[in-house]
Amino acid sequence: MTIKRKKVFSSLTKSKFQESDCIKFFCGTRHLIFWILFIKEEIKLFKEKTLCENLNKMSFFGRFVEAGRIVLITFGKYADKIAVIVDILDQNRVLIDGPSTVNGIPRHVISLKWVSLTNFKIDIKRGAKLDEVEKKFKEEKIEEQWNKTSLAKKLKLKDMRAKMTDFDRFKLGFAKSKRKAILGAEIKRLMKEKK
Amino acid sequence: MSTKITKGTVLILLIGKFKGKRVVFLKQLSSGLLLVTGPYQVNGVPLTRIKRKYVIATKTNVDLGDLVVPEEINDKFFSPKKPINNWEKTEEKFFTKKQELKKVGLNETQTKLQNQVDKPVNEAIKKVQYLKEYLTARFKLQKGQLPHKMKF
């Protein structure tokens, strides 16, 4: 069943309900009559845009698996690092690149299960070479933008905590206890004043 | 991968009276045991020997420089010093009260050697901020801390 454009337009002009909010569309096949109801404004918008754009507008997705999409690698050797999707292999796998000159992450195939999409994207064509990827990556200053995000900061903190030596851990605890003592004394003083 | 223990490495004792204490490694004795000191003024641990097995080596190092441990401090130095009980099996001695084992404290030479070794170590500790407090405190595992995931 296809909605034939000519028929739709002709029905618009001929229809009895032209000036009302709801307009009936007549979509017919050989033996079936199919009635579809739309609101006037929606029709106007629908006419202006392509089908794909309309679907995207209706969908709730903003981050797509596409060439140039920046991803955060969540498992494996390069965990907690960002990379660029260079090409898509199939439903589950993509080809990513650090870029290798910036990140040290070589161009390799990775499962989408090991990766999570970010908001960032660079404008490269599918299968772009390292030079181009590197150039666009540096132009857009992706690393700087990524480091500003709260997730990047959290991952950095997590990494720092894991690397702490026994002495570092002691110093941290010691500083916390000192801080608590100062705060405690101040709070006590304020409570006394209130009374 | 185990941390290499060198002169001045801070170790965490895991057994004995001083378990949990952080001490400074001096040298390995001929018996294979590790010679450590608190230092005594910092955390109350005197010159003692421990097995490598009962110790966690940390990455923290006290800069001891050219410290040379006196030759007198060897395995014999640590041999137990009990008063000799001449327990002769005679009727007379059977009915007399058993001679109480006196608690043997440190003698003069021992304290002298302790101070001699501790002096440069104390000086080295003063140079690093919070190191003294670190050696005073005992190591404790807190909730959520997993030793196999921690880095020392």
Image (tube, grey):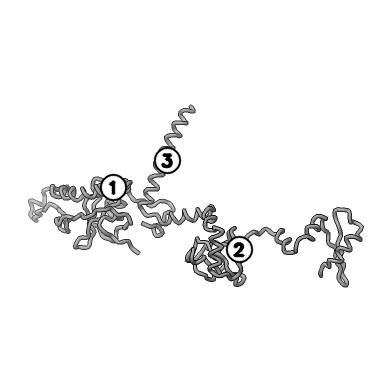
Q: Residue at x 30, y 54 (%)?
A: B61
| Disc number placed over residue A180 in the picture, else none | 3
Q: Which x, y percent locates residue B2?
A: 33, 63
Residue B104 visible in the shown view: no
Question: Where on the picture, by quarter, is residue B48?
Answer: bottom left
- Residue type, label 3: Lys
Q: Chain of mark 2?
A: A
What's under tag 1, amino acid-wise?
Lys
Q: Give a yes or no on whether discs 1 and 2 share a subunit.
A: no
Disc 3 packing (10 Å; few <14; some 14–19; many ≥20) = few
Q: Please identify the quarter of the rendering in which residue A94 is found.
A: bottom right
Q: Which mark is residue A123?
A: 2
The residue depicted at 62 percent of the width and 60 percent of the height is A63
Task: Residue at 85%, 64% (x, y): give it.
Answer: A8
B3, above or below B41, in the image: below
Q: CA distance from mark 1 to mark 2?
A: 54 Å
Q: Is residue A28 visible?
A: yes
Chain letter, disc 3 residue:
A
**Amino acid of disc 2:** Asp
Left or right of residue B14: residue A179: right
Q: Position of residue A11 (x, y in %)?
A: 89, 62
Q: Which residue is mark 1?
A: B127
Percent of width and height locating residue A93? 58, 70
Residue in the foreground of this view, choosing between B75 and A135: A135
The disc placed on residue B36 is none
**Structural crowding at the residue carrying mark 2, measured as other residues with C-alpha within 10 Å and reported as few (<14), some (14–19) or many (≥20):** few
Instruction: Measure the alpha-carbon separation of dots 3 and 2.
Output: 50 Å
Horizontal arrangement in the rendering, residue A95 relative to residue A35 (left or right)? left
Q: In the structure shown, which secondary structural element does the residue marked by tag 2 occupy?
A: loop
Q: Which sits earlier in the primary sequence, circle 3 or circle 2?
A: 2
